[in-house]
Amino acid sequence: MSIYQHFRPEERDFIDQVENWRSYVENTYAPKLTDFLDPREQKVLGMIIGEHHEVKFQFFGGHDQAERKRALLYPEYYEVDIKDFNLTLLEVNYPKKFVTIEHPHILGSLMSLGLNRNKFGDILVVDEEIQFIVAGEVEDYVRLQLESIGKAKISLTEVSLDKIIFKEEHWTEMTTTVSSLRLDTLIAAIYNFSREKAKTYIAQGLVKVNFTLIENVAFICEEGDVFSVRGEGRASIKSIEGKTKKDKWRVVVGKLK
Protein backbone atom coordinates (compact mmCIF):
# COMPACT_ATOMS: atom_id res chain seq x y z
CA MET A 1 0.00 0.00 0.00
CA SER A 2 1.48 3.33 -1.07
CA ILE A 3 1.76 6.09 1.54
CA TYR A 4 0.68 8.61 -1.12
CA GLN A 5 -2.89 7.30 -1.27
CA HIS A 6 -3.54 8.70 2.21
CA PHE A 7 -2.75 12.24 1.09
CA ARG A 8 -3.47 14.72 -1.69
CA PRO A 9 -1.65 14.37 -5.03
CA GLU A 10 -0.13 17.84 -4.64
CA GLU A 11 1.43 16.78 -1.32
CA ARG A 12 3.70 14.12 -2.85
CA ASP A 13 6.79 16.33 -2.85
CA PHE A 14 6.29 17.26 0.79
CA ILE A 15 5.72 13.60 1.73
CA ASP A 16 9.00 12.69 0.03
CA GLN A 17 10.71 15.47 1.93
CA VAL A 18 9.39 14.19 5.27
CA GLU A 19 10.57 10.69 4.40
CA ASN A 20 14.02 12.09 3.59
CA TRP A 21 14.13 13.91 6.92
CA ARG A 22 13.21 10.72 8.74
CA SER A 23 15.87 8.74 6.87
CA TYR A 24 18.45 11.39 7.72
CA VAL A 25 17.74 11.09 11.44
CA GLU A 26 17.73 7.29 11.27
CA ASN A 27 21.00 7.11 9.34
CA THR A 28 22.98 9.85 11.09
CA TYR A 29 21.43 9.53 14.55
CA ALA A 30 21.36 13.33 14.62
CA PRO A 31 18.50 15.86 14.79
CA LYS A 32 17.02 17.55 11.71
CA LEU A 33 15.40 21.01 11.83
CA THR A 34 12.83 21.93 9.16
CA ASP A 35 11.72 25.31 7.86
CA PHE A 36 8.40 26.71 9.08
CA LEU A 37 5.43 24.48 8.34
CA ASP A 38 1.80 25.50 8.06
CA PRO A 39 -0.84 23.59 10.07
CA ARG A 40 -1.60 21.13 7.26
CA GLU A 41 2.10 20.34 6.78
CA GLN A 42 2.43 19.82 10.53
CA LYS A 43 -0.43 17.35 10.41
CA VAL A 44 1.04 15.47 7.44
CA LEU A 45 4.45 15.23 9.14
CA GLY A 46 2.84 13.97 12.33
CA MET A 47 0.90 11.30 10.44
CA ILE A 48 4.01 10.08 8.58
CA ILE A 49 6.35 10.02 11.56
CA GLY A 50 3.57 8.86 13.87
CA GLU A 51 4.61 6.75 16.83
CA HIS A 52 7.91 5.88 15.17
CA HIS A 53 10.13 4.30 17.82
CA GLU A 54 13.45 5.60 16.49
CA VAL A 55 12.47 9.08 15.31
CA LYS A 56 10.60 11.60 17.45
CA PHE A 57 9.42 15.12 16.60
CA GLN A 58 8.39 18.38 18.22
CA PHE A 59 6.96 21.61 16.81
CA PHE A 60 7.70 25.14 17.98
CA GLY A 61 6.90 28.52 16.46
CA GLY A 62 7.89 30.98 19.16
CA HIS A 63 4.81 30.90 21.38
CA ASP A 64 2.08 28.50 22.47
CA GLN A 65 -0.50 29.71 19.95
CA ALA A 66 1.87 29.91 16.98
CA GLU A 67 0.28 28.85 13.71
CA ARG A 68 3.45 28.39 11.67
CA LYS A 69 6.04 26.20 13.39
CA ARG A 70 9.39 24.59 12.72
CA ALA A 71 9.66 20.86 13.33
CA LEU A 72 12.61 19.17 14.96
CA LEU A 73 13.02 15.48 14.16
CA TYR A 74 15.40 13.72 16.49
CA PRO A 75 16.55 10.30 17.73
CA GLU A 76 15.29 8.85 20.99
CA TYR A 77 18.34 9.80 23.01
CA TYR A 78 18.21 13.50 22.12
CA GLU A 79 17.10 16.11 24.67
CA VAL A 80 15.37 19.00 22.91
CA ASP A 81 16.23 22.58 23.83
CA ILE A 82 14.27 25.63 22.66
CA LYS A 83 17.48 26.93 21.06
CA ASP A 84 17.40 23.96 18.68
CA PHE A 85 14.55 25.61 16.78
CA ASN A 86 16.78 28.58 15.83
CA LEU A 87 14.08 31.24 15.90
CA THR A 88 14.63 35.00 15.91
CA LEU A 89 11.95 37.49 16.91
CA LEU A 90 12.28 40.84 15.15
CA GLU A 91 10.43 43.99 16.15
CA VAL A 92 9.57 46.62 13.56
CA ASN A 93 10.38 50.24 14.41
CA TYR A 94 8.51 52.79 12.30
CA PRO A 95 6.91 56.27 12.64
CA LYS A 96 3.67 55.14 14.27
CA LYS A 97 2.18 58.65 14.37
CA PHE A 98 2.25 59.04 10.62
CA VAL A 99 1.94 55.55 9.15
CA THR A 100 -0.40 52.58 9.47
CA ILE A 101 1.09 49.19 8.63
CA GLU A 102 -1.08 46.11 8.25
CA HIS A 103 -0.38 42.39 7.97
CA PRO A 104 -0.57 42.22 4.13
CA HIS A 105 1.96 45.06 3.81
CA ILE A 106 4.42 43.20 6.05
CA LEU A 107 4.03 39.87 4.26
CA GLY A 108 4.39 41.55 0.87
CA SER A 109 7.59 43.29 1.91
CA LEU A 110 9.04 40.08 3.34
CA MET A 111 8.24 38.17 0.15
CA SER A 112 9.94 40.89 -1.92
CA LEU A 113 13.26 39.94 -0.29
CA GLY A 114 13.44 36.83 -2.47
CA LEU A 115 13.15 34.35 0.41
CA ASN A 116 10.64 31.53 0.56
CA ARG A 117 7.61 31.95 2.85
CA ASN A 118 8.82 28.94 4.82
CA LYS A 119 11.68 31.01 6.25
CA PHE A 120 9.16 33.14 8.14
CA GLY A 121 6.89 32.20 11.03
CA ASP A 122 3.97 34.18 12.39
CA ILE A 123 3.55 37.90 11.75
CA LEU A 124 2.22 39.56 14.88
CA VAL A 125 0.35 42.87 14.83
CA VAL A 126 -1.17 44.13 18.06
CA ASP A 127 -2.42 47.72 17.96
CA GLU A 128 0.64 49.60 16.64
CA GLU A 129 3.20 47.02 17.69
CA ILE A 130 4.63 44.76 14.98
CA GLN A 131 6.84 41.70 15.31
CA PHE A 132 7.61 38.72 13.13
CA ILE A 133 9.46 35.46 13.61
CA VAL A 134 12.20 34.45 11.21
CA ALA A 135 14.49 31.45 10.80
CA GLY A 136 17.74 32.32 12.55
CA GLU A 137 19.84 31.36 9.53
CA VAL A 138 18.40 34.22 7.44
CA GLU A 139 18.13 36.83 10.19
CA ASP A 140 21.20 38.81 9.09
CA TYR A 141 20.00 38.93 5.49
CA VAL A 142 16.53 40.12 6.50
CA ARG A 143 17.88 42.82 8.78
CA LEU A 144 20.21 44.04 6.06
CA GLN A 145 17.67 44.04 3.22
CA LEU A 146 14.37 45.07 4.81
CA GLU A 147 14.49 48.85 4.99
CA SER A 148 10.86 49.72 4.30
CA ILE A 149 7.35 48.31 4.52
CA GLY A 150 5.05 49.93 2.02
CA LYS A 151 6.09 53.57 1.95
CA ALA A 152 7.32 53.57 5.55
CA LYS A 153 11.01 53.52 6.39
CA ILE A 154 11.62 50.96 9.13
CA SER A 155 14.35 49.43 11.22
CA LEU A 156 14.44 46.06 12.95
CA THR A 157 15.41 45.16 16.49
CA GLU A 158 15.90 41.64 17.79
CA VAL A 159 13.94 40.95 20.97
CA SER A 160 13.83 37.84 23.13
CA LEU A 161 11.00 35.37 22.62
CA ASP A 162 9.62 36.08 26.08
CA LYS A 163 8.80 39.61 24.85
CA ILE A 164 6.57 38.33 22.09
CA ILE A 165 3.25 40.11 21.54
CA PHE A 166 0.09 38.33 20.54
CA LYS A 167 -3.63 38.66 20.84
CA GLU A 168 -5.42 35.89 22.65
CA GLU A 169 -7.29 34.17 19.84
CA HIS A 170 -10.81 33.07 20.62
CA TRP A 171 -11.97 30.14 18.53
CA THR A 172 -15.52 28.89 18.71
CA GLU A 173 -16.40 25.32 17.81
CA MET A 174 -19.44 24.26 15.89
CA THR A 175 -20.61 20.96 14.47
CA THR A 176 -22.21 20.94 11.06
CA THR A 177 -23.36 18.33 8.58
CA VAL A 178 -22.59 18.63 4.89
CA SER A 179 -23.46 16.58 1.85
CA SER A 180 -19.83 16.44 0.73
CA LEU A 181 -16.35 17.62 1.69
CA ARG A 182 -16.06 19.85 -1.38
CA LEU A 183 -14.68 23.32 -0.72
CA ASP A 184 -17.80 25.16 -1.90
CA THR A 185 -20.04 23.01 0.31
CA LEU A 186 -17.91 23.53 3.40
CA ILE A 187 -17.41 27.26 2.86
CA ALA A 188 -21.17 27.67 2.49
CA ALA A 189 -21.79 25.77 5.74
CA ILE A 190 -19.04 27.41 7.80
CA TYR A 191 -19.74 31.01 6.78
CA ASN A 192 -23.50 30.62 6.35
CA PHE A 193 -23.36 31.35 2.62
CA SER A 194 -25.43 29.95 -0.19
CA ARG A 195 -23.56 27.45 -2.38
CA GLU A 196 -23.66 29.95 -5.25
CA LYS A 197 -22.09 32.69 -3.14
CA ALA A 198 -19.40 30.26 -1.96
CA LYS A 199 -18.65 29.33 -5.57
CA THR A 200 -18.41 32.99 -6.52
CA TYR A 201 -15.97 33.76 -3.67
CA ILE A 202 -13.79 30.81 -4.69
CA ALA A 203 -13.86 31.73 -8.40
CA GLN A 204 -12.93 35.33 -7.57
CA GLY A 205 -9.80 34.23 -5.69
CA LEU A 206 -11.09 35.20 -2.26
CA VAL A 207 -10.56 31.81 -0.59
CA LYS A 208 -7.36 30.23 0.66
CA VAL A 209 -6.89 26.74 2.03
CA ASN A 210 -3.76 26.23 4.11
CA PHE A 211 -2.55 29.66 3.01
CA THR A 212 -2.76 28.73 -0.67
CA LEU A 213 -5.26 30.28 -3.08
CA ILE A 214 -7.71 27.61 -4.26
CA GLU A 215 -10.02 28.35 -7.19
CA ASN A 216 -11.37 24.83 -7.64
CA VAL A 217 -14.84 24.64 -6.11
CA ALA A 218 -14.61 20.82 -6.06
CA PHE A 219 -11.39 20.77 -4.03
CA ILE A 220 -11.79 18.05 -1.38
CA CYS A 221 -11.10 19.26 2.15
CA GLU A 222 -9.59 17.23 4.97
CA GLU A 223 -9.16 17.28 8.71
CA GLY A 224 -6.67 19.97 9.76
CA ASP A 225 -7.33 22.28 6.81
CA VAL A 226 -7.30 26.00 7.58
CA PHE A 227 -9.57 28.31 5.59
CA SER A 228 -9.30 32.01 5.00
CA VAL A 229 -12.10 33.89 3.27
CA ARG A 230 -11.34 37.52 2.56
CA GLY A 231 -13.45 39.76 4.74
CA GLU A 232 -14.95 36.80 6.61
CA GLY A 233 -12.09 35.56 8.80
CA ARG A 234 -10.47 32.18 9.35
CA ALA A 235 -11.77 28.73 10.18
CA SER A 236 -10.42 25.20 10.38
CA ILE A 237 -11.63 21.62 10.30
CA LYS A 238 -11.01 20.26 13.79
CA SER A 239 -12.27 16.78 13.04
CA ILE A 240 -14.37 14.79 10.60
CA GLU A 241 -16.63 12.56 12.66
CA GLY A 242 -17.88 10.28 9.91
CA LYS A 243 -21.27 9.99 8.25
CA THR A 244 -24.75 10.34 9.68
CA LYS A 245 -27.64 7.97 9.04
CA LYS A 246 -28.70 10.34 6.26
CA ASP A 247 -25.30 9.85 4.59
CA LYS A 248 -24.02 13.35 5.42
CA TRP A 249 -20.59 14.18 6.81
CA ARG A 250 -20.50 15.39 10.41
CA VAL A 251 -17.71 17.96 10.70
CA VAL A 252 -16.41 19.81 13.76
CA VAL A 253 -15.22 23.27 12.75
CA GLY A 254 -13.26 25.91 14.64
CA LYS A 255 -13.96 29.52 13.72
CA LEU A 256 -11.96 32.55 14.78
CA LYS A 257 -14.16 35.22 16.32
Image (cartoon, helix red, strand yellow):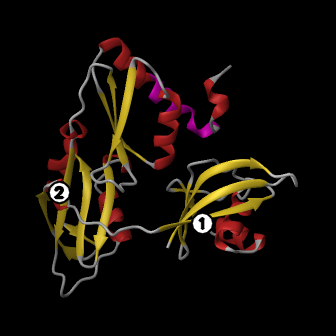
Tell me which numbered mark, 1 or 2, is placed earlier along the sequence.
2
Q: Residue at x 49, y 56 (%)?
A: 211
Q: Quadrant of the N terminus?
A: top right
Q: Is residue 248 left or right of residue 240?
A: right
Residue 67 in the image, given as x and y percentages of width and height: 40, 54
Is residue 191 visible from the viewing direction of this image? yes
Q: Residue at x 52, y 37 (%)?
A: 44
Which amino acid lies under the numbered mark 2 shown in the image of this protein? Asp
Residue 196 in the image, given as x and y percentages of width and height: 77, 72
Image height of 172 relative to 70, above or below: below
Observer-nearest residue: 255 or 42? 255
Closer to viewer: mark 1 or mark 2: 2
Which amino acid lies under the numbered mark 1 shown in the image of this protein? Gly
Question: Which residue in the protein does label 2 denote?
Answer: 162
Disc 1 on helix, strand or loop?
Answer: loop
| View extreme (right): residue | 246
